[in-house]
Image: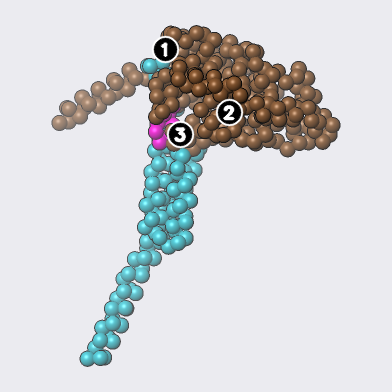
Chain colours: A brown, B cyan
């Protein structure tokens, strides 16, 4: 019996070693190429430009419903409210255009590495930094009117191409990217799932009645109107929901972990066309 | 006969107060200790972002049960919270090194 136990232990060790490949140092660009290759090989019939449409690129029935929904987009009122926000001056007479002089088509500039602050700055964070700089209260990061201004910015940014940069001369930026990558592959929660378990290993498979979308294109269409939410919500709200689905305690929206995760994931989507705001089930 | 009955009842009450009440008192102390252990385990899991979703609810309900004097229920809930927190901590510590799974080639 002790020999048998030893054999089982040894075998388990070998199996575990083969299941997990020790990480080799790869550059972000190598990671991105691998990510695109994985998606295109897993879904060979999906045209490259279709990945930004998520599950609707691979699910013909869902696609029909989605196209019908897009005829009268449920996110439209949020875009209109966001435009009004953009054009309404703050109490001090300044406005969003003073913080973002390029205009509202700025979604492709985020997330970005802020050298001075030494951190990843996402678009919602930049919106609140702008508000606070002009004496306004910051908006909540998951629900509420932040989604209006983000919807307007996303709409105005449609057609722009994702172009996240990781400055080579600041190793802290690469460290933030690597932290996001580590988060993506780390199993967490009572169900012991990582982001990758659902969105790489099982993309295209069903979870209950839903099809897990290909991860290529995951960052292009935020904020999103979800039928489940009955409103528009942010990417970090979705991160929180994913973590809770696997029975992990959700982390803070716009906290360091989720910002780094967004940095990693959006970098992998470099080259994908922005098409927000989106509509999903 | 009457006197004997009264003596017997008094004796029974005395035995109960000497034996059963301390037992209950012990149960309360145990529940308080277990709850504190669960809270400590949750904080430890939080240091590695390893808290599981329902731990907070288990602890909150264990606190409520303790206040209501339901020590058994409080201990059951605190025990679950403690175990889940210990597992959440171990889960994160076991993955300190980034490993890329073999399915992702």
Q: Is residue A204 left or right of residue A181?
A: left
Q: Which is more foreground, mark 3 or mark 2?
A: 2
- How far apart marks 1 and 2 lie (CA) works out to 27 Å
Label pair 1/3, CB-CB below 8 angstroms: no
| Helix, strand or loop for disc 2 | strand
Depth check, front residue: B16 or A116: B16
| Residue behind mark 2 | A225
Question: Are discs 1 and 3 both within one chain?
Answer: yes
Q: Considering only vertical position in the picture, is A281 above or below B37?
A: above
| Helix, strand or loop for disc 1 | helix
Which quarter of the picture shows residue B72?
Answer: bottom left
| Helix, strand or loop for disc 3 | helix
- How far apart marks 3 and 2 lie (CA) works out to 19 Å
| Type of secondary structure dominating the magenta stretch | loop
Please name the residue shown 58% across and 21% down the image.
Answer: A70
Q: Is residue A10 left or right of residue A53?
A: left
Q: Which of the numbered marks, if any, corresponds to residue A254?
A: none
Please name the residue shown 36% across and 68% down the image.
Answer: B22
Which stretch appears magenta? A187-194
| Residue behind mark 1 | A42
Q: Is residue B86 left or right of residue A281?
A: left
| Residue behind mark 3 | A245
């Amino acid at each position: 019996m002790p020999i048998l136990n030893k054999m089982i232990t040894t075998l388990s060790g070998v199996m575990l070693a083969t299941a997990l490949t020790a990480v080799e140092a790869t550059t972000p660009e190598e990671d991105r190429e691998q990510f695109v290759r994985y998606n295109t090989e897993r879904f060979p019939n999906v045209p490259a430009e279709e990945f930004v449409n998520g599950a609707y690129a691979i699910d013909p029935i869902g696609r029909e419903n989605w196209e019908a929904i897009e005829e009268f987009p449920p996110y439209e009122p949020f875009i209109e409210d966001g435009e009004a926000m953009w054009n309404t001056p703050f109490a001090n007479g300044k406005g969003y255009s003073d913080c973002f002089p390029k205009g509202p088509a700025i979604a492709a500039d985020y997330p970005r590495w802020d050298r001075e602050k030494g951190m990843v700055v996402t678009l919602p964070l930049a919106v609140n930094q702008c508000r606070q700089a002009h004496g306004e209260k910051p908006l909540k990061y998951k629900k509420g009117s932040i989604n209006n201004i983000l919807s307007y910015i996303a709409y105005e940014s449609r057609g722009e191409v994702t172009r996240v940069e990781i400055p080579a001369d600041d190793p802290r930026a690469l460290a933030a990217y690597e932290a996001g990558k580590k988060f993506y592959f780390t199993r967490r929660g009572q169900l012991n799932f990582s982001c990758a378990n659902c969105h790489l290993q099982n993309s295209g498979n069903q979870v209950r009645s839903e099809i897990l979308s290909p991860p290529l294109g995951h960052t292009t269409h935020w904020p999103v109107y979800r039928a489940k939410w009955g409103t528009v919500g942010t990417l970090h709200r979705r991160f929180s929901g994913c973590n809770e689905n696997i029975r992990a305690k959700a982390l803070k929206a716009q906290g360091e972990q989720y910002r780094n995760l967004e940095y990693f994931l959006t970098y992998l989507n470099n080259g994908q066309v922005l098409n927000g705001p989106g509509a999903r089930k | 006969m009457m006197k004997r009955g009264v003596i017997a009842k008094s004796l029974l009450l005395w035995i109960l107060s000497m034996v059963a009440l301390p037992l209950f008192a012990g149960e309360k102390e145990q529940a308080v200790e277990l709850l504190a252990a669960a809270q400590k385990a949750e904080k430890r899991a939080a240091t590695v972002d390893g808290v599981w979703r329902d731990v907070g609810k288990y602890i909150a309900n264990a606190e409520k049960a303790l206040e209501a004097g339901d020590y058994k229920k409080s201990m059951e809930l605190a025990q679950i919270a403690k175990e889940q927190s210990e597992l959440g901590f171990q889960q994160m510590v076991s993955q300190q090194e980034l490993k890329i799974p073999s399915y992702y080639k």
